[in-house]
């Protein structure tokens, strides 16, 4: 009997030891804490995609038309990327797309119908540049519309513009700008992704406001109103997304460094990341 | 539950001033209770829509026909100037999915519940206007800034129209997703001459989404069975470990997946065998009838 207890105790202590953390693990834990705190807040904002049927047809067509050149550019860029590098680039691209899907449909904890969400496009923009992300973005938006009834087919253009074109372009510009200013790479990624996410939500608000201006204050008042609806959840989420993306890129540099080198990511040595 | 409360509040704001209070209050409560009752049980698994689509009796209908007719119906719906088109499509799609497709009603309502609750929150934002005076049907004072959040008859009419559009269009979208598995949708896009790189990416992303979700679930179950979520602290620890491993593991998985494809001589586009579903006369006629009805309603004078 005593033997058994001893054995159990030793096993338990071994288990405990396997749970002690290295420094990077602690960082991950800290982030996940922030993650939980943010998601556990009773969020009461609309989802960030404009839903099916919410926009009048002329706006659907207009936003769709704006997206077309970016998408064409994106397809061309992706074709070149794949032609010039090995097959791993395709995996990276598809993985980035799956990441966008999963992260922008995360509903934790699933309080029915009450969540904003992250965009996930910042990661792709930093790795591949803004135009390939627009293609990934529109694929993900089609999946979300048909698999989760999240977003929609008629509002595809508007959503694509805000999430997969405007946000990534800002994120990419900020990232390049920050690197040029010799800011630490991790910090640059964080700032770029966070502000890209916030910009996406500003664009969404403006899109809604253009379609439905206020009677009294016009487009501007209406934009302020929609911004107010999104703000309480989207700001913390943007911060979380920034942190998460930094972590992911750090992680990827450890397990996919060869592939990252191929798409010439992180060639100039800057910062620790 | 939240959806139910939301429905009550929303329908009250939408119709207040147009119906007498003695009628309105019971109506709102009834709607709320109804929704609470229907969405009482069930665990919503992620991507259960995909499974439901495989089970639907409408799956064998030609995907081109399904996709295009529903897409056109959506456009008709959002272009119409009255609320009837949307409401008609809401009912018609319910009939199609439940009675023709053979989906249980409660599942259908659960699929629809999420977008509808988003819609209602968005609708509330449309309904309330910031105005300097209390001239609306319903007014909420904002004490510090000295203005009112008010609902007027115009915003009520506008919101009703938008909500009807959205309900109709979302129902169409739900029918597409509940009757057409993703590979069929991708094949429709392929026939629309989408670039082959995009089609490849779509297949891969679709596959990788499932890899990510499956790995995540497995890791969660593993952590759970080791009492990882027993207390708040341990659950934080477990969540952290899961997320730190998720991407690395799924990347390896995806890499192997691609190796397997390459070892079977896959070098150009990814193609799957498609079932040849011909358009039958009945299907075409049903589609035409739906379209005709929607068009008639669309041009109905109001």
Image (cartoon, coloured by chain):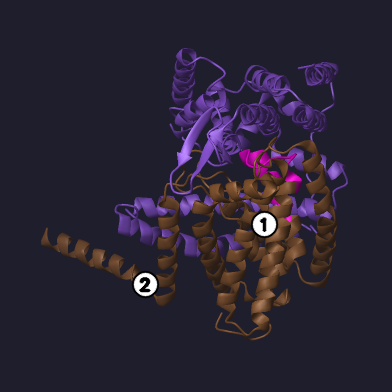
Chain colours: A brown, B purple
The answer to the question of whether label 1 and label 2 lie on touching residues, with beta carbons closer than 8 A, is no
Q: Position of residue B293 (x, y in %)?
A: 79, 16
Say which label, 1 or 2, has the lower sequence index.
2
Q: Position of residue B1 (x, y in %)?
A: 43, 31
**Relative to A270, residue B189 above or below:** above
**Relative to B47, residue B81 above or below:** above
- State whether residue B263 appears in this view: no
- State whether residue A248 appears in this view: yes
**Rendered image quadrant of residue B261:** bottom right
**Relative to B42, residue A147 above or below:** below
**Rendered image quadrant of residue A91:** bottom right
Q: Is residue B91 left or right of residue B276?
A: left
Neighbours of disc 1 within 10 Å: few (<14), some (14-19), many (20+)? many
Q: Is residue A149 magenta?
A: yes
Query: For the residues carrying marks 1 and 2, which lies nearer the camera in this image?
Result: 1
**Rendered image quadrant of residue B248:** bottom right
Closer to us: B223 or A130: A130
Over which residues does the magenta segment extend?
A: A136-157
Quadrant where the N terminus of chain A sits is: bottom left
Q: Main secondary structure of the magenta part?
A: helix
Q: Position of residue A19 (x, y in %)?
A: 34, 67
Q: Is residue A131 magenta?
A: no
Q: Residue furthest left?
A: A2
Q: Which residue is mark 1?
A: A97
Q: Is residue B267 left or right of residue A102?
A: right
Q: Residue furthest right?
A: B193
Q: CA distance from mark 1 to mark 2?
A: 31 Å
Q: Which residue is mark 2?
A: A21
User: Chain under label 2?
Assistant: A
């Amino acid at each position: 009997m005593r033997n058994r207890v001893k054995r159990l105790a030793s096993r338990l202590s071994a288990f405990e030891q396997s749970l002690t953390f290295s420094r990077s693990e602690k960082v991950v834990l800290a982030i996940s804490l922030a993650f939980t705190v943010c998601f556990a807040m009773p969020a009461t904002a609309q989802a960030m995609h404009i839903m099916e049927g919410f926009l009048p047809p002329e706006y659907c067509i207009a936003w769709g038309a704006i997206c077309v050149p970016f998408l064409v550019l994106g397809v061309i860029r992706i074709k070149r990327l794949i032609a010039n590098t090995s097959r791993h680039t395709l995996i990276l691209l598809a993985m980035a797309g799956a990441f966008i899907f999963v992260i922008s449909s995360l509903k934790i904890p699933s309080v029915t119908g009450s969540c904003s969400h992250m965009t996930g496009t910042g990661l792709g923009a930093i790795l591949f540049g803004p135009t390939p992300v627009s293609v990934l973005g529109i694929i993900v938006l089609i999946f979300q519309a048909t698999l989760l009834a999240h977003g929609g087919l008629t509002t595809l253009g508007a959503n694509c513009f805000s999430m997969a074109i405007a946000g990534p372009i800002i994120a990419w510009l900020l990232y390049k700008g920050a690197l040029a200013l010799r800011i630490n790479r991790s910090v640059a990624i964080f700032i770029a992704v966070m502000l890209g996410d916030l910009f996406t939500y500003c664009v969404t608000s403006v899109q809604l406001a253009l379609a439905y201006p206020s009677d009294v204050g016009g487009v501007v008042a209406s934009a302020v109103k929609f911004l107010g609806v999104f703000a309480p959840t989207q700001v913390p989420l943007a911060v979380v997304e920034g942190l998460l993306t930094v972590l992911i890129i750090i992680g990827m540099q450890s397990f996919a460094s060869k592939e990252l080198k191929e798409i010439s990511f992180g060639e100039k040595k800057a910062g620790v990341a | 539950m939240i959806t139910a409360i939301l429905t009550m509040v929303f329908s009250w704001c939408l119709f207040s001033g147009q119906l007498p209070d003695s009628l309105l209050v019971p109506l709102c409560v009834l709607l709320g209770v109804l929704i609470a009752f229907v969405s009482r049980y069930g665990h919503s698994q992620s991507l259960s829509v995909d499974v439901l689509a495989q089970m639907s009796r409408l799956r064998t209908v030609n995907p081109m026909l399904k996709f295009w007719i529903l897409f056109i119906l959506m456009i008709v719906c959002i272009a119409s100037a009255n609320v009837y088109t949307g409401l008609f499509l809401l009912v018609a799609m319910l009939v199609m999915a439940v009675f023709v497709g053979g989906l249980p009603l409660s599942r259908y309502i659960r699929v629809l519940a999420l977008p509808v609750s988003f819609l209602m929150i968005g609708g509330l934002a449309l309904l309330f206007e910031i105005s300097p005076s209390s001239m609306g049907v319903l007014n909420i004072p904002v004490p510090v800034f000295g203005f009112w959040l008010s609902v007027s008859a115009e915003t009520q009419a506008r919101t009703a129209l938008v909500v009807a559009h959205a309900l109709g269009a979302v129902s169409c979208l739900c029918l597409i997703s509940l009757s057409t598995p993703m590979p069929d949708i991708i094949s429709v896009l392929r026939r629309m001459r989408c670039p082959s790189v995009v089609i490849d990416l779509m297949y891969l992303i679709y596959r990788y989404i499932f890899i990510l979700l499956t790995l995540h679930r497995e890791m969660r179950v593993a952590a759970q069975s080791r009492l990882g979520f027993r207390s708040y602290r341990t659950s934080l620890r477990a969540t952290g470990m899961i997320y730190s491993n998720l991407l690395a593991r799924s990347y390896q998985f995806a890499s192997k997946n691609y190796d397997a494809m390459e070892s079977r001589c896959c070098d150009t586009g990814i193609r799957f065998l498609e079932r040849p579903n011909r358009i039958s006369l009945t299907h075409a006629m049903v589609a035409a009838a739906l379209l005709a009805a929607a068009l008639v309603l669309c041009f109905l004078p109001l």
